[in-house]
Image (cartoon, rainbow, N blue to C red):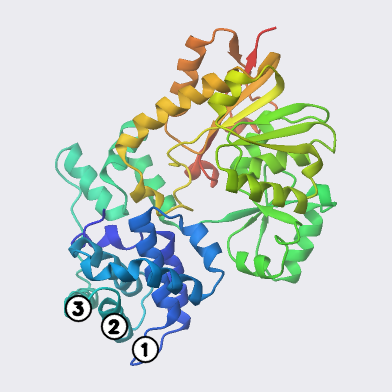
């Protein structure tokens, strides 16, 4: 967990912090009761920190309603806030630090509201501590003397300094420095800390072309750029809320999907009439895109262990008018593969991974992920790859993909798999994706810094006849 004394590390450690800042800016009312929106944002930080909740799902569940979130805190957190220790006070401090340092909000208003928030969420005495710390921060900022560590000493010391400066866990910094070098590691951290851009995919199954989507975005005055890599995709830096409020997603006219995910589907290369398995399908973005490319012919079997998320996938498939070519299967892939006698043309294993390629959109993930997780994930990835391989027919294709940039989750997993399964060989991604994304071994790889996309990886493997 971030330390309160390390100023830059606690500025932005969750997506909820960013959401909070925008809400607070429009609801600033000094010397009045704390705004509901601000209390909601604080609750979200607590839910992410204590319960491992996902910031994006909290935003959806809240639906902009303070009652929904505050109802939660009354039922759960409200019974335990008096017992929170000093580590939990940092959650409150994080809000004030972010507003003062990153947003240049009026100091008196920030201090006032966060003191009140600390008294409500923790205990009356906590307000005095928050008041003192935030006032000291304001003084340091006014004097242009905010503390920053010096980049000196051995590798370990420099990693600690970089971790503080760029708000990343030390283990990530050391890992990236090892694989990328310090200069590239810094560029990656800067990218992760920048405001993320999003991509929209026009839903061709509803007859929506990219030109149609561009027209809608122009009407909504949403700045955008055409994807350089995929004909159905558009990049959006700001204005996504306008798209949502206009109902374009709700009507199934488009979907929010990063181009890197679209390029993984391009590696699969779904063709009409084929039978395809998406092994870990939920939430279903790749499933839906693959289904849209079948032109109503063939089937995508979406397997996932989470029944609730499969239900959402089914609902979205109907909305996107691709439900006729999607079949959902609630199962553990390993059990399903062992018991299946059917073989398929193509199998996509978008494996559970560290998510180290998507940290610009998942700021909370960097603090929830541990170095120990990497070893556990590699074991799971090997097990799932072995299971997925059982579903591929002779001459069929197995695509292993992640949203990670870590070689141990990507290239090394494929190398280990090929040693265990000599009946498979690499089928280079040349011709399926732009050459700039193809590695020397024929894998697909998107680099956040180089390509300005989420980091992703995909290996296309063919089973011998």
Lateral position of residue 372 relative to residue 383, left or right: left
Lateral position of residue 403 relative to residue 46, left or right: right
Lateral position of residue 49 relative to residue 286, left or right: left
Q: Which mark is residue 139?
A: 3
Residue at 84 percent across and 38 percent down: it is 295
Q: Position of residue 453 (x, y in %)?
A: 55, 46
State the separation of the CA atoms marked 3 and 1.
25 Å
Q: Is residue 147 above or below residue 123?
A: above
Q: Nearer the viewer, mark 3 or mark 2?
A: 2
State the separation of the CA atoms marked 1 and 2.
8 Å
Say which label, 1 or 2, has the lower sequence index: 1
The crowding category of the residue bearing disc 1, from other C-alpha atoms within 10 Å (few below 14, some 14 to 19, many at least 20), is few
In front of the other: 57 or 359 = 57
Lateral position of residue 400 relative to residue 269, left or right: left
Kindly indicate the quadrant of the structure image that contains residue 152. Answer: top left
Q: Which mark is residue 33?
A: 1
For label 2, the residue is 116
Which SS class for mark 1? loop
The crowding category of the residue bearing disc 3, from other C-alpha atoms within 10 Å (few below 14, some 14 to 19, many at least 20), is few
Q: Position of residue 303 (x, y in %)?
A: 62, 34
Residue at 42 percent across and 39 percent down: it is 354
Residue at 45 percent across and 73 percent down: it is 71
Residue at 58 percent across and 23 percent down: it is 388
In front of the other: 394 or 94 = 394
Say which label, 3 or 2, has the lower sequence index: 2
Kindly indicate the quadrant of the structure image that contains residue 170. Answer: top left
Q: Nearer the viewer, mark 3 or mark 1?
A: 1
The crowding category of the residue bearing disc 2, from other C-alpha atoms within 10 Å (few below 14, some 14 to 19, many at least 20), is many
């Amino acid at each position: 967990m971030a330390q309160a004394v390390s100023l830059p590390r606690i500025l932005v450690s969750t997506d909820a912090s960013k959401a909070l800042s925008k809400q607070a800016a429009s609801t600033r009312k000094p010397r009045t009761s704390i705004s509901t929106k601000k209390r909601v944002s604080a609750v979200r930080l607590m839910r992410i920190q204590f319960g491992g909740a996902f910031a994006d799902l909290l935003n959806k569940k809240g639906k902009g309603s303070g009652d929904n979130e505050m109802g939660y805190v009354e039922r759960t957190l409200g019974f335990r806030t008096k017992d929170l220790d000093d580590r939990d006070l940092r959650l409150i401090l994080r809000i004030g630090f972010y507003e003062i340092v990153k947003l240049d909000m009026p100091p008196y208003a920030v201090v006032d509201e966060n003191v009140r928030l600390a008294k409500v969420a923790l205990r009356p005495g906590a307000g005095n501590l928050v008041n003192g710390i935030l006032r000291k921060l304001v003084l340091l900022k006014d004097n242009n003397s905010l503390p920053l560590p010096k980049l000196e000493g051995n590798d370990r010391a420099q990693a600690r300094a970089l971790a503080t400066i760029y708000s990343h866990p030390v283990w990530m910094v050391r890992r990236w420095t090892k694989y990328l070098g310090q200069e590239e590691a810094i560029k990656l951290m800067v990218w992760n800390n920048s405001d993320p851009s999003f991509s929209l995919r026009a839903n061709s199954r509803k007859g929506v072309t990219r030109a149609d989507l561009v027209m809608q975005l122009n009407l909504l005055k949403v700045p955008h750029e055409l994807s350089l890599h995929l004909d159905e995709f558009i990049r959006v830096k700001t204005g996504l809320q306008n798209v949502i409020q206009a109902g374009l997603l709700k009507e199934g006219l488009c979907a929010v999907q990063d181009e890197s995910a679209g390029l993984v589907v391009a590696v699969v290369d779904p063709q009409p009439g084929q039978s395809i398995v998406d092994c870990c399908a939920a939430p279903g973005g790749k499933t839906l895109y693959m289904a849209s490319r079948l032109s109503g012919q063939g089937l995508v079997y979406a397997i996932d262990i989470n029944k609730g998320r499969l239900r959402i996938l089914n609902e979205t498939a109907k909305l996107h008018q691709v439900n006729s070519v999607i079949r959902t299967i609630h199962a553990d892939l390993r059990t399903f593969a062992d018991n299946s006698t059917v073989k398929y043309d193509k199998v996509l294993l978008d494996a559970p991974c560290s998510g180290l390629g998507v940290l610009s959109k998942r700021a909370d993930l960097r603090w929830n992920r541990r170095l120990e997780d990497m070893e556990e994930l590699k074991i799971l990835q090997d097990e799932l790859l072995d299971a997925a391989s059982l579903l591929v027919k002779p001459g069929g294709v197995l695509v292993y993909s992640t949203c990670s940039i870590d070689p141990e989750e990507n290239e090394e997993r494929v190398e280990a798999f090929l040693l265990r399964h000599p009946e498979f060989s690499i089928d280079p991604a040349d011709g399926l994706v732009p050459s700039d994304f193809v590695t020397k071994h024929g894998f697909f790889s998107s680099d956040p810094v180089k390509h300005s996309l989420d980091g992703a990886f995909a290996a296309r493997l063919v089973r011998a006849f």
